[in-house]
Amino acid sequence: MDSENAAQTPPVYAAGIPHIQSKAVVVKTITAFLLSHGMD
């Protein structure tokens, strides 16, 4: 899915994808942490 999209993605936007993905990972990690520790 990602590889198909990358082929049609402008280089400038593609260059920003890793940063966006890493941000999403951080958000998911924090959310999972809060959920797992806040549901006591």
Image: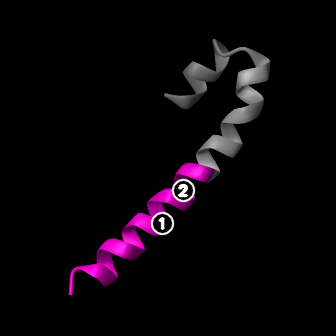
Q: Outermost residue, left direction?
A: 40
Mostly what secondary structure, the magenta segment? helix
**Does dot 1 land on a helix, a strand or a loop?**
helix
Label 2 – label 1 distance at C-alpha: 6 Å
Q: Which residue is mark 1?
A: 29
- Residue 9 on image: x %, y %: 66, 16
Describe the colour scheme in one phrase.
Answer: one colour
Number of residues whose C-alpha sits closer than 10 Å to that of mark 1, classed few (under 14), some (14–19) or many (20 or more): few
- Residue 7 on image: x %, y %: 66, 16
Q: Are marks 2 and 1 in contact (CB under 8 Å)?
A: yes
Q: Residue at x 55, y 30 (%)?
A: 2
Image position of 9 with respect to 25: above or below: above
Q: Which residue is mark 2?
A: 25
- Residue 5 on image: x %, y %: 57, 20
Quarter of image, res 36 = bottom left
Number of residues whose C-alpha sits closer than 10 Å to that of mark 2, classed few (under 14), some (14–19) or many (20 or more): few
Q: Is residue 25 magenta?
A: yes
Quarter of image, res 25 = bottom right
Magenta extent = 23-40
Relative placement, left or right, of 1 versus 20 is left
**Does dot 2 land on a helix, a strand or a loop?**
helix
Q: Give 19 or 9, whichever is nearer the viewer.
A: 19
Q: Outermost residue, bottom direction?
A: 40
Name the amino acid type tagged 1.
Answer: Thr
Name the amino acid type tagged 2.
Answer: Val
Relative placement, left or right, of 8 versus 37 is right
Quarter that holds the C terminus: bottom left
Q: Is residue 13 magenta?
A: no
Q: Residue at x 79, y 21 (%)?
A: 12
Image position of 31 with respect to 23: above or below: below
Q: Residue at x 69, y 42 (%)?
A: 18
Q: Residue at x 64, y 22 (%)?
A: 6
